[in-house]
Image (cartoon, rainbow, N blue to C red):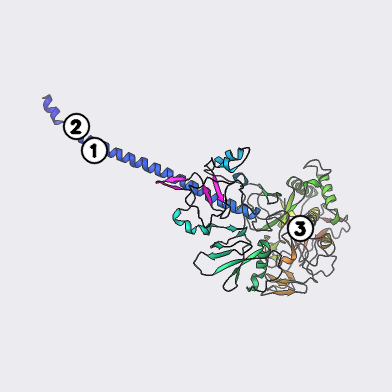
Amino acid sequence: MINTKMKSIRGISLISLVITTIVLIILANVIIYNVRDNLRLGKLENMQNDIENLRDKISSYYTQNGKIPATLQYTNFSHIGVISQAVDTGDFLVIDLSALENLTLNYGKDFEKVKSLESLTPEDAKNYTDLYIINETSHNIFYVAGITVDNETYYTDYTSESIDSVSVDLRYVDGVKIPDGFYYVEGTKDTGIIIKSNDNNEYEYKWIVENDEIETIPENVAMNTNEEEDFIKSVNAYKGYYQNMHDSSVMYLGLNNWSPQYKVEGTYKDKNGDTAYIPMGFSVSETPRENTIHEGLVVKDSNDNEWVWIEVPKTIYTTATSSEDYENIEKDMQTYASTYMDSDYTDTWYNGCGIATQTEYNNLKNTMLKSVYEKGGFYIGRYEAGTVTARTANSDTLTRAVIQQSVYPYNYITCSDAQAASRDLVTGGKTSSLMFGIQWDLVLKFIETKGGKTQSELKTDSTQWGNYANSTFNITRGQYTTNPSITNSWITVDGNYQKNSALLTTAGMTNTNSTLNIYDLAGNVAEWTLEQNTADTNLPCSFRGGHYANTDNNNSCSYRTGYPNLDASDYIGFRPTFY
């Protein structure tokens, strides 16, 4: 009976067990292979992300400093099979990762070891492979160790099959930028860099050097009149332009290049080693002549308002002992900028300045003094404050101000309302306001010391670089009016307009009326400040800089005068500051 029951119970056969085991082994191997493959692909993606990140950082560094962040030659690269004999013609250099701000990489750990060597030589460096290197000519980037996937090793973010198209990644030759969508063909800056479009267009462009600043369009250049000022500004910034070798048409480099927004407040160092603090959420201009302190550093906030850094050297403080020694900080600033001061005008509270009480005024001034002392400067609007809709009367609704090119001047506004509009303008956790009188004086001292204008051009006669009634200059863009109080009186410039009478213009219409990237500081509209006119209690407010209706040369950039605290005018606007 027992034997019969045992025979009726079937077990797992040996063959079934073997088959099951084989299937499990196969599945396990597939899983292991896929996991390993995914890990390899992940490593490859990490390297490619590193290179993309490095390319962006180095491009910004190069634009700001005119050189790549690399000096140590690297010679152990013969195994890298994606080097182009046509493009990667210069030396290979170890990328100095410490020179690039806010950089996070997956690889390149050997750089710290190389950096720690007492004597940095190519012979020392070649023993390390967890490094990123760059070709000094093409700016192409390679990872020396490489990442191997399916028996193929990758050293950059393109493969050997695409090596013939690598030239499109060449972004600079002899410091001259190759525009997006074009690739380098041949030549140097001196002989003429030749480029060609990626879309197989047969025509080539040649780089034309212009070492001297130009004020008019060269004779052999034909272009739309509304582009002339942008062309001139680009040529003076980049020292040249590209010209079509077939029909003499031109292509010039754009000027709206900005760094990524700062995620936290940081310090910017230009190619000369000068520094400025950058608030959170702001970007720094990467356009030549806008990215150094001594030429007027331009930044942009998250609302696209543009600002210029005003450096105040820390060496001026001979009596101040700390950032809260407000009285002596102000005295040291006054001594430094004494040329532009007037004893009848003081930074003291008065009714109608836009600040409710004397205590609030003093607190705001102390905040400014402390910040300038600690940071080494402050920011002012690159342009006069403006509006997107032209104002024609004091009764017009107050709108949010902007600091951007080609907007209408924010006139017909009282000093008190101008302070309120300035207070609400800034981003990045900073304090904004109208300029105090000492700040205006410091702006003039900054322009003088940096060689923007002479003391005479700032203090005696500013008509050669400001919009006054008797000034003459060419206008190629924007709008103007001879009667701001009339609705729809603004005329759009069509072509080249020669200004020779009293007229009000939109912001930043001509480079003639700028210095160190600050537009219309002299003339156009006069600008409210927080300075009090102590000589006349009926005219306690003060404005600076003269305006478009002035014919008197004495109404220079440093000019100031009193005004009733409840009045507004077509010829008075404002320019905010933040600190």
The residue type indicated by label 3 comes to: Ser
Q: Which residue is mark 1?
A: 19
Q: Which residue is mark 3?
A: 416
Label 3 neighbour load within 10 Å: few <14, some 14-19, many 20+: many
**Left or right: residue 462 compared with residue 203:** right
Of the image marks 3 and 2, the number of the one nearer the N terminus: 2
The residue type indicated by label 2 comes to: Gly
The location of residue 40, given as percent across then percent down, is 43, 44
Badge nearest the viewer, 3 or 2:
2
The location of residue 340, given as percent across then percent down, is 84, 56
Disc 3 + disc 2, Cβ < 8 Å = no
Q: CA distance from mark 3 to mark 2?
A: 97 Å
Of residues 294 and 434, the one drawn nearer to the viewer in this rendering: 294
Q: Which residues are magenta?
A: 129-154
Q: Which residue is mark 2?
A: 11
The residue type indicated by label 1 comes to: Ile
Quadrant for the N terminus in the image: top left
Badge nearest the viewer, 2 or 1:
1
Of residues 63 and 504, the one drawn nearer to the viewer in this rendering: 63
Disc 2 + disc 1, Cβ < 8 Å = no
Badge nearest the viewer, 1 or 3:
1
Q: CA distance from mark 2 to mark 1?
A: 15 Å
Judged from the image, the secondary structure of the residue bearing numbered disc 2 is: loop
Q: CA distance from mark 1 to mark 3?
A: 90 Å
Is residue 288 shown in magenta? Answer: no
The location of residue 35, given as percent across then percent down, is 39, 42
